[in-house]
Amino acid sequence: MDLPNDVALATALDRQGTDPPISRLPPELLSRILVLAKENIVSCLLVSHLWREVSLQCPELWNTIEISSDTWSEVPRWFQGLLIKQACGRLVSLDVRFVSDDGSDREVEDEETDDEGLDEEFLDSIVELITDVRIQVLTIQGLEGNKTGAEFLNMLPAASISELEVLNIWVKRLPPTPFSGAPTPRLRHLTLEHYNKPLPDAYLSYMGTLTHLQLTCITLDWEKVYALLEEVKSTLEFLGISNSLPNRPASKDLDEPPPIIALDKIRNIELIECLPQVHHLLKSIRIPSAASLFTQGYDTDSPAKDLRDVFSACPASRSTFILEPNYIKMSVGDQEEFGPGGLFADFQVGNSGRGFVEEKPWLHVIFDMGPQNFVVWDMEAFLLELFPPHKQWGLPNMCLSNLVSFHIEDVDLIHDDGENPLRPRYSLPLAFWKTLGQLPMLTDLRISAFSFHQFAQCLEEDSIARYISGNTLNPLSSSLFSSLERLDLEGHCFDPDGCGIVNATHRHPYKLCENFRTPYFIFIRNIRLRRGCGRPLKSLELRRCTGILPEHLDELALNIQRLVWVSHGLSSIPSMEYEQGSVVQSRRHRSN
């Protein structure tokens, strides 16, 4: 298992022979041998005499077979048959890749070519070998423009695709009729990438059972769009359209929109680089409130107007949109992908949008929709510039009462050679924290790389005001963030001594006032104790936060079910994780 490459492994196997017998080798070694054998011709020739016995012990290794036209011809014919036939009907996934002689996908024009030769033999060998195999997942990549390649789907035996569930076609040209019209009653997942060519009508007949449909670079006219949606409205759960620009309906058609299509089972809609026509499409679709919409790629000078059109088109789903305008035309800055994949929230705001301030910024339009979850990846762009520093900070007319989670995922830290190697670059205004603290349903708050002192200050001011007004007998008790159950903080400064931070409003370094109480102790009083003013925290994560030391952790962990603390880079301080008041992990944190 530790041999450096497959050639060394093949050489060792050749020397070893069959002593010990192949049946005595551990399964993980058998798996490694077969994976390498399928990737390298040398390994194939050396270990092929072992495959029949191995296949009986590890049938799952035959579930997926990848075939490439540039190497398939080098595989001996008898071994090709062994590779396919040994599947014995267990072939779950077949991946066929057409490449040119130099190993790259070949760009071929629409006209037919006479370059058949090897490709024809390649196709014939595959078709012959899979005649008795039932394929569940079929992927075709780099399909050539010649006659043989374009008709590959028609060459597949009807029996082989009778149990087909997933079909992925990433091609240069689609045949007019796939599978020669043979039915695929179990087809659930269809992905087509067609390089801006019209979608043949025959493909609509294969969409009636789909739950997942992804179209990339497909030219669709509106009649086909509606026909497609009508075909899948009772089964479709995911619809993705990328780089596909449907022809805009004629002006007379806009006055009389087609009947509403109800996608009752839809759960996710993903529209990328096709937003100028999005609101026309959405006006003809009724989406259930459980669905979500992911949009990316504005090409317009008025984001706020288009957003209002999109949201008003689907009022039933207004609280479940995902917005990630990372590719707004007006932004010439970073074009990075937003954050980690899989993070599901109603609104995700990326690092674009600089340079425009409207009468009502489109960020307000988002808040007006009453989101349940809100994720921000660049607070400087979306808060500082949409709410200019010279204006009074506030969140006017924003329907945030439904907000359950709020995440600021901006890890833009200032690196220093002093004792505090990580410092936040921006602070958030006090009114912002007060607004969040009054939200009745906010249970999850995750803030990265921002000054923490305003958070603590708003807690203290609220507790003092409550004490003076007679609403509480405890001057250290705040009602803010009373519903909070999870708090994650990263890169925050709890210790004000010697820590200059940049104020987001005035944008200049400053020292905290000497008479300002230590934010850490305010945090302890109001977040941990929770005496009569809210539920205790269930989870607290403190990562790279200056001013909190190991001796503070025991006190913090008393009334918190889960506590995670990672030091800010000092190699002498370990990282710890508490659960139910006891240390469950203690690991030495190594500094960079």
Image (cartoon, rainbow, N blue to C red):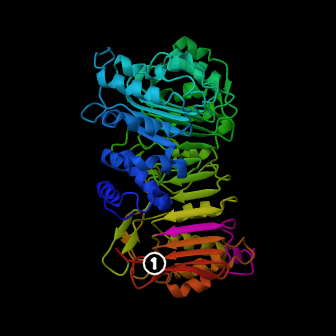
In the rendered image, the vertical position of residue 69 relative to residue 435, given as above or below: above
* Residue 142 left/right relative to 163: left
Q: Secondary structure at mark 1?
A: loop
- Asked whether residue 45 is drawn in magenta, I would say no
- Tell which residue pokes out farthest to the top in this image: 252
In the rendered image, the vertical position of residue 316 relative to residue 185, given as above or below: below
Q: Quadrant of the C terminus?
A: bottom left
Residue at (70% x, 32% y) in the render: 264
x and y, in percent, of residue 214 in the image: 52, 32
Q: Nearer the viewer, residue 369 or 170?
A: 170
Magenta stretch, main secondary structure class: loop
Q: Nearer the viewer, residue 216 or 368?
A: 216
- Crowding around mark 1 (Cα neighbors within 10 Å: few <14, some 14 to 19, many 20+) is many
Q: Nearer the viewer, residue 426 or 543?
A: 543
Q: How many marks?
A: 1
- Asked whether residue 484 is drawn in magenta, I would say yes
Which amino acid type is marked by label 1? Ser
Q: Quadrant of the N terminus?
A: bottom left
Residue 216 shows in this picture: no
In the rendered image, the vertical position of residue 66 relative to residue 402, given as above or below: above
x and y, in percent, of residue 512 in the image: 44, 77
Range covered by the magenta-colored residues? 466-490
Residue at (45% x, 73% y) in the render: 544
Quarter of image, res 73: top left
x and y, in percent, of residue 576 in the image: 53, 79
Quarter of image, res 120: top left
Residue 447 shows in this picture: yes
**Residue at image mark 1:** 567
- Tell which residue pokes out farthest to the left in this image: 102
Q: Nearer the viewer, residue 172 or 63?
A: 63
x and y, in percent, of residue 17 in the image: 36, 57
